[in-house]
Structures are given as C-alpha cells and as structure tokens.
Amino acid sequence: MKGAARRGLILLAALLVPIAAASALPHEAAVPGGIVLAHLGKSAQAPQAWFQDKRVAVLRDRGGWLALVGLPLGLEPGGHELRIVAADGAETTKPLHVAAKHYALQRFTVPDRRKVEPLPEDVLRIAREQKRINEIKAAFRDEPGLEPDLAFRQPVPGRLGSNFGLRRIINGLARNPHAGIDIAVPVGTPVRAAGAGIIVDTGDYFFNGNSVYIDHGQGVVTLYCHLERSDVRPGERVAAGQRIGLSGNTGRATGPHLHWTVIANGTAVDPRLFLPRAAR
Ligand SMILES: [Zn+2]
C-alpha cells in the first residue's frame, strides 16, 4: 500500500475508535461516594436506568449494556434499587447492595474567615452559584452513537490526594464533606481535561474560585477548581488531555492546588475510580 493511502486508513481507523470501541470502564466500589457497574443484559437497543430518580449513564460492554451508578456520599449503606426501562418500555428493577465506608474527620483552619462564615451578600451569591451548579449536575446529554469518554487521565501531574469524602470541620464549624480530590501543584501548572467533552461553564465561584466544568456525556461531569485562569469557553469541545487553564489558589483554598471533582448521575464520586490503578 502506498504511504499516503496507508496513512489515510490509519487516520480513518483512529477516527472510528471512539464510536466503535467500548469505553475503558472505571473501577467499582459499592460504597457511599463510589460507583456500581450494573449489567443490564444484551438487548439490541440501550435501556435507560435511574437511581433515586436520577438517570444514570448506560455504556456498551461486551455485547451488552452496563449502568454506571454514582453513589452519593450521604447514601445509607444497605439495599437499594436501580430502575431499568427497556427500549420497548418494559420496566424492571435490579437490587444494588451498598457497603458502609468510614470517612475520617478532618479539621483545618482557613485564614480568610469570610470563606467559612460568609457575609449576607456572599450568601446571595452562593445561592445563585449553587443553583447553577445544580443545573449542571442535573443535565443529561445523550448523543446517539457516542459514549462518554471515561478513560480519564490525571488533570495535573503530582501525587493524588486521598481526601475524597472527608468530613470537615473548618474553623471549628461543620461543613460539607470534601467532594473531590486535591493535587498539590504550583500556581501556573497547566490543567488538562480528564477526558473529551464539552465545556458547560467557567467562572469565578465563591468557594471553588475560578472553575471549569466539562460535560463528558450521560451525566458524567468533571470540575476543576481554584484555577489561576481558564483558557476555554462554554460550548467549546475539548479533547482528552487538552489544556483548559492554569492551576492557582483562588476561592476557599489554603494553598496552591487543583481540586478535581467527578460527578455521575448528579452526585460527586471518588475521582480515583476513573484513573488507571497505577495512578492511585
Ligand atoms: Zn479540595
């Protein structure tokens, strides 16, 4: 085969891979803050599945279908149910067993007291931002024939924090658990998209600082916080590994780092489950 034709074929093959091949699957951890991969059988058309009234991602897997179910940090351990609706409308349920997991309590001090005890005008801003965040988390973008790219890569180099899910006492006050992991990196470190997707929001948030939200499809969203600046705009498509901004120390941060959150069916889950084992 002539060089140019062969290169053409290789390029074509490379373009087809994201559609034809099953995504690399995340690791399972059936605990609050983890994920369950539930087999849904081998129907010709993809079924739809819901967990606690939130639609979950359904991926192709070895000739069948697999639901990726994000388990909220606040979920009661024990028996739960996945609701499945086949393409013909037939409804079934599948039991999910969730084991208990203990998340340690963390106490620390944030010198900027206003970031822990917001002023009345901050409270209004926080409520506005929370509404926006909830909208982003609730979105379910399904592109026929395109599966979410879930073979994530680490957005910045460095040691991954193990602080996902920690219960927190900040400046002596009980606050929400830590919904992501932190990676300590100097200000100005390039931050890269964990996977391919569409930028759904960028902006300066009260707690999260400069942030970028990437929608990977089917309710899987990643969030990059405390950035020095972002280099992308809402609506833009990004490739896996594409630079989306520079790390920083903005918002409620106690030092330069990247805070990285992964959301599935509206709930934050441990981002390490989406990385190759070697990185964890
Ligand atoms: Zn963090």
Image (cartoon, helix red, strand yellow):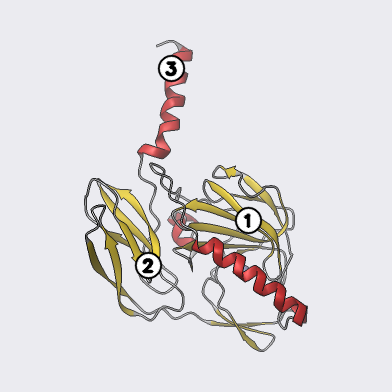
Hey, which quadrant is residue 13 in on the image?
Answer: top left
Residue carrying label 3 = 6
Between circles 1 and 2, the one closer to the viewer is 1
Q: Secondary structure at mark 2?
A: loop
Quadrant in the picture for the N terminus? top left
What kind of residue is marked 3?
A: Arg
Looking at the rendered structure, the kind of residue marked 2 is: Ala
Picture disc at residue 201 = 1
Give the labeled residue for mark 2. Answer: 29
Residue under the point 41% across and 70% down: 71
Mark positioned earlier in the residue sequence (2 or 3): 3
Q: How far across and down, in percent of the image, does residue 223 sit? A: 58, 59
Circle nearer the viewer, 1 or 3: 1
Which residue is farthest front? 89
Amino acid under label 1?
A: Asp
Cβ–Cβ under 8 Å for marks 2 and 3: no
Inspect this view and state whether residue 115 appears. Answer: no
Regarding mark 1 in the picture, which secondary structure is present there? Answer: strand
Q: Residues within 10 Å of mark 2 (few under 14, many from 20)?
A: some
Q: Label 1 to label 2, Cα distance in Å?
A: 29 Å
CA gap, disc 1 to disc 3?
Answer: 40 Å
Nearest to the observer: residue 251 or residue 247: 251
